């Protein structure tokens, strides 16, 4: 890996792409520290220390939510819009037709994603700011002058517009990296936010319990190895292509394989699961201080039930992650339509009749190998509580979900970098041959 990076810096065009990517990420990190007016930073920090449910949103915003900066929403609304449209594609005939129209269809779906991002960003901003405005700590309310009361309309509107503009700016920066940099821009923005908090966590661990640094480094290393193995793990289904004669030329007749990923769902199941787990706690927080006694009691019971300190939360979290892994994998498999693609290309699995039998066979293989990926994602989800039970300390060097993102982004970026190096090596070889 280090050799690939060294070789990339020797090539002027690749070096330019890498430097451009770093500059965009640095600008984003500066913007993530520009707070919105009316924010009590001391109260915000106290809230995030006491509520782990806000951790995922803070992670997707690159740490900007804990400061409630102009980038507080990060790219989370855009990711939500992508997931919504991806789930609607096999259901809505118009979107399904667009997905089969090649580059033009994908561009149209991307436009719909951007349009859907705007109202989602407004809704996310409204929900988060309302929750922060109603929450109060010893340092006071986290955000003031927010709400639909007399005298607060203008500050509320400006806050929502600022948060939405910050999301669109973050997406634009990600697109810049896609066009002129190296790697996936949106993923790299999230990646930069996750690793930016490592020095602070190391300093906190060094002050509180220095020995815990070694423990967490070992746990992190073991987790990284497991993530790489599962991320790169695949079942290779052999495929033969029938010979076809066209004129004097013979096509096909070769053997290859179809790689089926052990974890083709990525981290999407974790996003689904944690979103559902957060919803009851957020809704109940609005009614905890209700004037009606039974409403307050029910809200308090729900709030304690979905507290991260209880066993019920982590058991349900594990079950939801496993269930959503199977659900999302099935959705992806149906959209790929591998059996039909093989049939059109004259390919077949040895011993399996093309058509419905091939679809059943591949579906069975996918569901069997998904069990490994689903259980692994479930363990990744509950890893914080397992680490706390073993070490007796709270927090991790990098959250397990964050670690999954970091490893995935690094592997994807290195693959793109190696592809760029191979392409340039091949071009250099052609020039030498000429």
Image: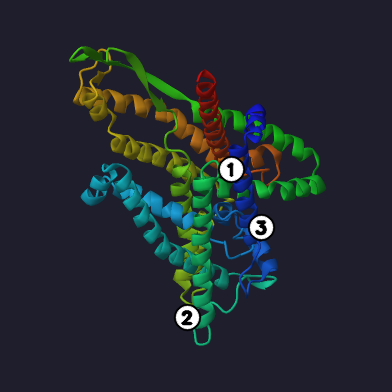
Q: Secondary structure at mark 1?
A: helix
> Can you tell which of label 1 and label 3 is closer to the viewer?
1
Q: Residue at x 76, y 49 (%)?
A: 204
Viewport quadrant of the N terminus: top right
Residue 117: image x %, image y %?
41, 59
Q: CA distance from mark 3 to mark 2?
A: 28 Å
- Compared with 335, 288 (above or below) is below
Which class describes the residues within 10 Å of circle 1: few (<14), some (14-19), or many (20+)? many
Residue on which disc 3 sits: 49
The foreground one among 1 and 180 is 180
Residue on which disc 1 sits: 17
On the image, which quarter does residue 49 sit in? bottom right
Residue 3: image x %, image y %?
66, 27
Q: CA distance from mark 1 to mark 3?
A: 38 Å
Residue on which disc 2 sits: 148
- Whether residues under marks 1 and 3 lie with C-beta atoms below 8 angstroms apart, the answer is no
Residue 235: image x %, image y %?
41, 22
Tell me: 342 left or right of 113: left
Counting residues from the start of the chain, the first of labels 1 and 3 encountered is 1
The foreground one among 182 and 429 is 429
Q: Secondary structure at mark 3?
A: helix
Q: CA distance from mark 2 to mark 1?
A: 46 Å
Residue 243 visible in this rendered orientation of the protein: no
Q: Residue at x 52, y 24 (%)?
A: 431
Name of the residue lying farthest toward the front? 434
Counting residues from the start of the chain, the first of labels 3 and 2 encountered is 3
């Amino acid at each position: 890996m280090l050799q690939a990076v060294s070789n990339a810096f020797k090539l002027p065009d690749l070096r330019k792409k890498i430097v451009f990517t770093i500059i965009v990420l640095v600008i984003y990190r500066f913007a993530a520290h520009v707070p919105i007016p009316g924010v009590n930073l001391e109260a915000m920090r106290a809230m995030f220390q006491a509520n782990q449910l806000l951790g995922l949103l803070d992670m997707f915003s690159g740490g900007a939510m804990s400061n409630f900066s102009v980038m507080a929403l990060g790219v989370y609304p855009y990711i939500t819009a992508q997931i919504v449209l991806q789930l609607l594609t096999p259901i809505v005939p118009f979107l399904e037709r667009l997905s089969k129209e090649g580059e033009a269809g994908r561009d149209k779906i991307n436009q719909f994603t951007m349009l859907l991002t705007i109202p989602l960003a407004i809704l996310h901003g409204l929900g988060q700011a309302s929750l922060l405005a109603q929450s109060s700590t010893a340092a006071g309310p986290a955000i003031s002058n927010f709400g639909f009361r007399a005298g607060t309309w203008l500050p509320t509107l400006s806050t929502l517009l600022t948060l939405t503009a910050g999301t669109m700016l973050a997406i634009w920066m990600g697109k810049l990296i896609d066009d002129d940099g190296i790697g996936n821009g949106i993923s790299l923005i999230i990646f930069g936010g996750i690793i930016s908090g490592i020095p602070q966590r190391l300093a906190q661990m060094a002050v509180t319990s220095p020995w815990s640094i070694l423990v967490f480094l070992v746990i992190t290393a073991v987790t990284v190895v497991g993530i790489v193995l599962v991320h790169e793990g695949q079942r290779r289904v052999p495929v033969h292509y029938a010979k076809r004669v066209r004129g004097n030329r013979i096509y096909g007749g070769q053997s290859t394989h179809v790689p089926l990923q052990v974890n083709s769902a990525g981290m999407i199941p974790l996003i689904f699961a944690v979103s559902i787990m957060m919803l009851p706690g957020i809704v109940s927080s609005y009614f905890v201080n209700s004037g009606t006694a039974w409403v307050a009691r029910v809200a308090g019971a729900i709030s304690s039930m979905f507290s991260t300190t209880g066993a019920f939360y982590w058991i349900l979290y594990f079950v939801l992650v496993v269930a959503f892994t199977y659900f999302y994998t099935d959705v992806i498999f149906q959209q790929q339509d591998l059996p039909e693609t093989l049939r059109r290309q004259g390919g077949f699995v040895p011993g399996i009749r093309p058509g419905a039998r091939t679809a059943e066979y591949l579906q069975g293989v996918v569901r069997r190998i998904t069990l490994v990926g689903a259980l692994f994602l479930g363990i990744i989800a509950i890893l914080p509580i397992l680490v706390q039970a073993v070490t007796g300390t709270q927090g991790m060097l990098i959250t397990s979900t964050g670690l999954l993102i970091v490893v995935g982004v690094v592997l994807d970026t290195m693959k793109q970098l190696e592809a760029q190096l191979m392409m340039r090596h091949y071009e250099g070889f052609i020039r030498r041959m000429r």
